[in-house]
Image: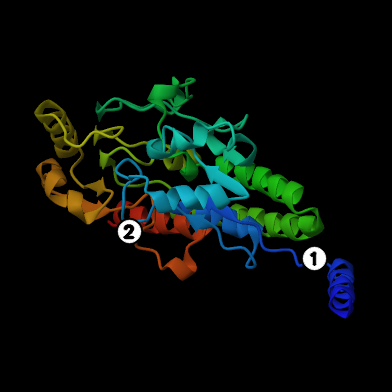
Amino acid sequence: MFRNAVIGLMLLVLQAMPAVARPLNIVTDIAPIRALSAAIAGPDISPDNLIPAAISPHDFVLKPSHMRQLAKADLIIWLGPRSTPALARPLARADVEKRLLTLNQLPGTLLLSLRAPGLFGYRPSSITPLAPRPENIDPHSWLAPDNLRLWARTIARRLSALDPDKTATYQGNLKQFLARLDKVERDIRRELQPPLKPFVQYHDSFQYFERGFGLLPLGAATTGAMESASLGTIIGLRDALADQGDACVFVTSPALKNRAAPLLTYGATLAVVDPLGRDIDPADYTPTTQLRHIAAQMAACLNAR
């Protein structure tokens, strides 16, 4: 009798105690999206990222541990099937839909078509994007500043819906992020002001960044997930670089330097520019530091005279 009374009293006390809210469990696909989510969520929430920076999103293989992460998530934020194809099937399940935020499918997101390898032949009047087919989307959409703005606002709304008590916190984080992004954009525009050296890319990865900051590359050796360039493409780009003289050739990782070497002509400089920011200190990795880092890597070659 006494034991039952004690248990009953303990239950009453527990019911009267306020529930301790746990931090939201957020899972993202790649490092830039984790950084964006963390900027809006704030220091109390540390999003889990599925695809390590050292692994290409196109080479990623889903493991049981990743499935457990997805199962526990309150919110899953990813770019979409074109950017991280290994997640397409598990995230298509009906039980995931309410916990999913697919950034590339948000109305207003800028999506560009993949460019054909070779010389682009750009003129300032020819850079209006056409609506891409789903299978032909350039997957590097996190490099467009306007996409980051749209996505940040949407993430803030989703977090507020999941955790209404912290709405003011999320909105404050959003305001600070947008202010930092505005400043970084202004700084990059000053850093990449013409005249700049002409440049080509070995792997076409910066179309969104170029559009955001008015850069017009001569061309690229490979586009999409292609691993090697055709001899004809290499010769065409090399001839164009030879005509330019002093120029830049960008590769996305040191591992691609040997593949890009045939593009080099007299006066051309080879430089690494990473669209994922894998060489940024993780403690300093934010969407704005990543954009600033790309600009600094490009400017080191494009501005050198």
Residue 208 figure quarter = top left
Give the vertical position of 182 relative to 116 (above or below).
below
Q: Compute the Cα span from label 2 to label 1.
A: 53 Å
Front residue (pair 266, 114) = 114
**Identity, as a three-letter code, of the amino acid under mark 2:** Ala
Give the vertical position of 104 relative to 259 (above or below).
above
Q: Position of residue 286 (x, y in %)?
A: 51, 60
**Residue at figure coordinates x 59%, y 40% from the top left:** 100
**Residue at figure coordinates x 16%, y 35% from the top left:** 228
Residue denoted by label 1: 19
Crowdedness near tag 1: few (<14), some (14–19) or many (≥20) residues, C-alpha within 10 Å: few
Horizontally, residue 107 falls left or right of residue 78, namely right
Q: Quadrant of the N terminus?
A: bottom right
What is the secondary structure assignment of the residue under circle 2? helix
Give the vertical position of 246 relative to 131 (above or below).
below
Instruction: Examine the rendering and report whether any part of residue 54 can be seen.
Output: yes
Front residue (pair 206, 280) = 280
Instruction: Examine the rendering and report whether any part of residue 189 can be seen.
Output: no
Q: Which mark is residue 300?
A: 2
Q: Earlier in the sequence, mark 2 or mark 1?
A: 1
Crowdedness near tag 2: few (<14), some (14–19) or many (≥20) residues, C-alpha within 10 Å: few
Q: Position of residue 34 (x, y in %)?
A: 51, 54
Q: Quadrant of the C terminus?
A: bottom left
